[in-house]
Amino acid sequence: MIPEKRSIFDNIALVFKGILMGAANKVPGISGGVIAFVGGFYEEFIFSLNRFNFYSFRLFISLKWKSFFGYVNGSFLTLLITGMLISYFSVAKVLDYLISNYELYVWSTFLGMIIGSVYYLEKQFGSWNTTSRLSAFLGLVAGLSLSLIPQMPANDNLYYVFFCGLISVAGMTLPGLSGSFLLIILGNYVLLLVDSVNALYDTFAFVLKGDYSFATDSQHLRLLKVLTVFTLGSMTGLVSLSHLLAFVLQKFKSITIAVLIGFVAGSLMVIWPWKNPIYESAYTDELSNGLKKVKNFQNYWPDFSEQENLIALGYIALGIIIVLGIDVYGKRGKKHGGVRVNR
């Protein structure tokens, strides 16, 4: 696969796609891989990650950095990762605010995006047969089963945090599998994607103001250490999963996509906007030295005679339109300056 030269507009668009991927990775039930898939750059993303192998390692330690950068498609990854970082420190905070103040409408939009993703994946699939239908059914069962697993308590043990990093990147490499959703099940969503990220953001803010008091704050330093280990786990998982996924897609592409279609459909229960919070268990949080409750939800069918529920339906439609709009842009990108695949 040889990436063609991109225009400035294409580079800006790629950063924007990275922002969308970063936001999607932050949202439970939404997969960054779906954004890559719908945006038309999924194969190049997996291809670039797959280039992190023994040969690229030899180039790196030999200080042949220009060759290394070209071999791993570094310009593409740099622009994409830049967008993700922007998202984590900007869009992610906006999402936190919106979820806190407009929860029903936000989750309705997310539900629409997943419905649009299912439609997109099914449209890309082609013809169905007995094997693919069975694969989709197994994916559906897996998605529904995961949504019924009770949330585990938070755990800042560094070995466990590294494991969470390995697992969380599944959403970036597998379209339809939400890494944030898996972190919720593992109990570390708030710790790893909210508290730790905010701690890093606050660190930058302190340094810019010339305030280094955080260096003596054990809780702040612990969060930074947790984020560092989580990042290392994520990078390890990202590279290793990309190699496995490249092999699976090459050998069993139709079965894999069918499973993902079923899994995405099964995850709709997780994103269902109409839910009541319930508390089933509690745990001691060492970082805050206090007792916290594990929050779970119970879905219910809404009364559509109420105005806010009708508005929520509009946001579901908006979510579908967003995904279909990305699909249209992705086709346009492939037609003008996309990626040429040589086999």
Image (tube, grey):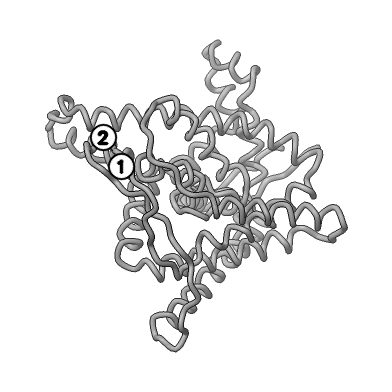
Mark 2 neighbour class, 10 Å CA radius: few under 14, some 14 to 19, many 20 or more: some
Residue 20, percent across and down? Answer: 48, 53
**Residue furthest out toward the right:** 130
Locate residue 237 relative to residue 106 in the image: left or right.
right
Q: Element under label 1?
A: helix
> In which quadrant of the rendered image does the N terminus lie?
top right
Q: Element under label 2?
A: loop
Lower sequence index among marks 2 and 1 = 1
Residue 58, percent across and down? Answer: 60, 13
Q: Nearer the viewer, residue 100 or 42?
A: 100
> Which label is found at residue 195?
1
- Discs 2, 1 touching: Cβ within 8 Å: yes
Locate residue 17 relative to residue 129 in the image: left or right.
left
Residue type at tag 2: Leu
Looking at the image, which residue is at 87% across and 57% down? Answer: 130
**Above or below, comparing residue 341 to residue 226 in the picture:** below
Locate residue 29 relative to residue 158 in the image: left or right.
right
- Determine which quarter of the picture holds residue 56: top right
Residue type at tag 1: Asp
Looking at the image, which residue is at 56% across and 43% down? Answer: 172
Looking at the image, which residue is at 69% across and 59% down? Answer: 121
Q: Which residue does the numbered mark 2 point to in the structure image?
A: 287
**Above or below, comparing residue 269 to residue 221 in the picture:** below
**Above or below, comparing residue 17 to residue 307 in the picture:** above
